[in-house]
Amino acid sequence: MATLVPIWLEYLRYTLTFSPLNQSNDRIGKMSTATASYIRNHLPDGTLVAITVFQSSAYEEAGLTNITDNTVREDLASVLPTHASGGTNIGAGMELCREVST
């Protein structure tokens, strides 16, 4: 299982955590599609975004990135996970989110 943790930083810090319990009904794919749509269509220019993923351990897919144009939006959307595997170490994921956002 994987958990997708995009961090959106505007005026305040927000962390959205997605934790599929299993891969039934393509949950991770649907969450990635929805997150990509949000990045492409709703976040204003100047928003800082980092994407981290955690499974058995946490890793950074995209460091803190300033959204400046559609190329940046597509680059961010392209690193979103499309499948889940391994365990779920939410502690490691949240710690990495904190590190990336500071």
Image (cartoon, rainbow, N blue to C red):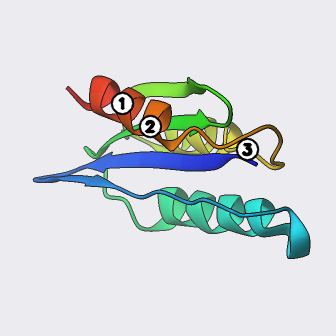
Residue that carries the numbered disc 2 in the rendered image: 91
Instruction: Give the vertical position of 96 relative to 79 (above or below).
Output: above
Q: Nearer the viewer, mark 2 or mark 3?
A: 2
The location of residue 68, given as percent across then percent down, is 36, 39
Q: Earlier in the sequence, mark 1 or mark 3?
A: 3
Query: Which residue is painted at 47% across and 30% down in the image?
Result: 92
Mark 2 packing: few (<14 Cα in 10 Å), some, or many (20+)?
Answer: few
Amino acid type at circle 2 is Gly
Q: CA distance from mark 1 to mark 3?
A: 19 Å
Q: Quadrant of residue 80?
A: top right
Residue 95 got which mark? Answer: 1
Residue that carries the numbered disc 3 in the rendered image: 81
The location of residue 7, given as percent across then percent down, is 37, 46
Residue farthest bottom in this picture: 25
- Residue 58 versus residue 45: which sits nearer the camera? 58
Q: Earlier in the sequence, mark 2 or mark 3?
A: 3
Q: Nearer the viewer, mark 1 or mark 2?
A: 2
Instruction: Give the vertical position of 73 relative to 18 (above or below).
Output: above
Query: Which residue is painted at 12% across and 53% down in the image?
Result: 12
Q: Secondary structure at mark 1?
A: helix
Query: Which residue is painted at 46% across and 47% down in the image?
Result: 6
Q: Secondary structure at mark 2?
A: helix
Instruction: Give the vertical position of 78 relative to 11 (above or below).
Output: above
Amino acid type at circle 3 is Pro
The location of residue 33, given as percent across then percent down, is 70, 64
Q: Quadrant of residue 86?
A: top right
Mark 1 in CB contact with mark 3 (< 8 angstroms): no
- Residue 22 versus residue 4: which sits nearer the camera? 22
On the picture, is 101 further left or further right than 89?
A: left
On the picture, is 62 further left or further right than 3?
A: left
